[in-house]
Amino acid sequence: MIEEVVIDHVGVAGDGVAKTKHGAVYVPFALPQEVANIAAENGHGTIIALKKRSPERVEAKCRHFEACGGCALQHWADQPYQMWKRSLVVEALEGRNITTNVDPVIPCEPHTRRRMILTARVTPKGQIVGFNRYQSHEVVAIEECPVSRPELVDALGAIRSVAALLANYAKEIRINVTLAENGIDVALEGCKINDEKLRQRLVEEGLKQSFIRLTADGEIIIEKERPELHFGSAAVELAPGGFLQATKEAEEFMSKLVMQGLKKTKNAADLFSGAGTFTFRMAEKMKVHAVENDDDALKSLDRAYRQSVGLKTVTYEKRDLFRRPLLPRELEAFDGLVFDPPRAGAEEQAREIAKTNIPRVVAVSCNPVTMARDLSILIEGGYTIEKLVPIDQFLWSPHVEAVALLKKRKPKPGWRL
């Protein structure tokens, strides 16, 4: 059905939302107050003709925009786009009846993302290496990416050459491409190498390219150097496909907020620590106990700590904090804590933290909805939000990072450091 609609606002997924007599219709790549003819079906619309353009509409930065699903909002001017990003956090908090000051969004520049996650898929027309098409599982070949670091974009040809060797062995593989401080790390997933001739061809191709490491399902194919990043003063070796913050700039800003939130802390816990993004910066000022469930991340953390000098004591444990959150009796040793869970948040762990008198807590999240839920639990337990900062490290996407600094209102009787 073709109909004319007026876009009311941009929704949480980055689509324009039109209010019609049939209900809300979600229209990708539409902006507030635009008038468009759309083809609508089941609450979703496709622009057929844009009859009135928003003055906030700008030219997209990438030729693949609207085909590639990596970006949803390249067509929106910076100021309203950043205000909308902040509103994602504000509205999530309001949904939990939390009223607090939310700082303006900290923007991240284009060409700063240091990881690409590509798909190589064999089709009747040959192998395609790229990102998923917008709201689809189809893969779109890419030649540029204004979000990513130029070094990663320059490596696309080499990545295609490696993927081509696997076309007869795996219909689809996932390719994690990470820019470490000393070069590019390529981790292939979904392609266990059992053929010795194929392994040798991958070795030869990998040695020709600029990668410092190439792995396939965790097996090292070539390793000219171990990929390395610095978290504070600690040099941390990256596990293949291991987690790291999307941009170095966002990581550094988030770390400053964590340290601000834990000022005067002497003994801290770092929950969902990964390989030590915050751990090692914290350890320059305080003792730290890191808790993480990923073996490779903990191995990287342990190795980095053993090779570092000038840090306070760092201990760690492997633990699934979703199934076994730290309990109040385990938390009572700490006078500060940071937690940075995956998108699902840390509901059970937040409930245990709320029962304690830990003076300072920092919550880091890439999901405003689960963050608001976890913050509401902490507030009910006696914490107040001192500062909350959204960070746009997922540029032109509907995702936003946020850091909240909390302080216990009034310690319960019997609390001691």
Image: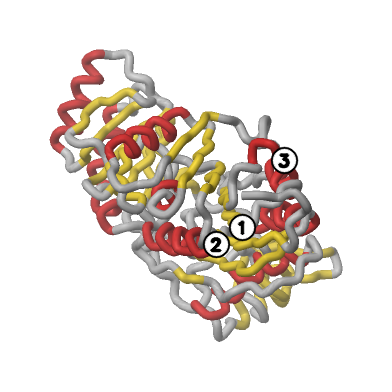
Image quadrant of residue 162? top left
Q: Position of residue 199 (x, y in %)?
A: 24, 20
Q: What residue type is labelled 2?
A: Gly
Instruction: Give the class, few, some or many, for how many residues have Cα within 10 Å of label 2's Cα (few <14, many ≥20).
Output: many
Secondary structure at numbered mark 3: helix
At 73% from the left and 74% from the top, the residue drawn is 5
Between 90 and 306, the residue placed more toward the observer is 306
Q: Residue 309 carries which label?
A: none
Question: Is 115 drawn above or below residue 253 in the view shown?
Answer: above
Q: What residue type is labelled 3?
A: Glu
In the picture, measured across the screen, residue 191 lies left or right of residue 43, that is left
What residue is disc 1 on?
Answer: 360
Q: Position of residue 322 (x, y in %)?
A: 66, 35
Upstream in sequence: badge 1 or badge 2: 2
At 38% from the left and 66% from the top, the residue drawn is 110
Q: Where is residue 135 in the image (x, y as percent from the top left)?
A: 58, 50
Q: Residue 348 carries which label?
A: 3
Q: How is the image coloured?
A: secondary structure
Instruction: Give the class, few, some or many, for how many residues have Cα within 10 Å of label 1's Cα (few <14, many ≥20).
Output: many
Question: Is 219 drawn above or below residue 353 in the view shown?
Answer: above
Query: Whole-Å distance between the Cαs marked 3 and 2?
Result: 22 Å
User: Which image quadrant: the N terminus?
Assistant: bottom right
Upstream in sequence: badge 1 or badge 3: 3
Question: Is 353 drawn above or below residue 98 in the view shown?
Answer: above
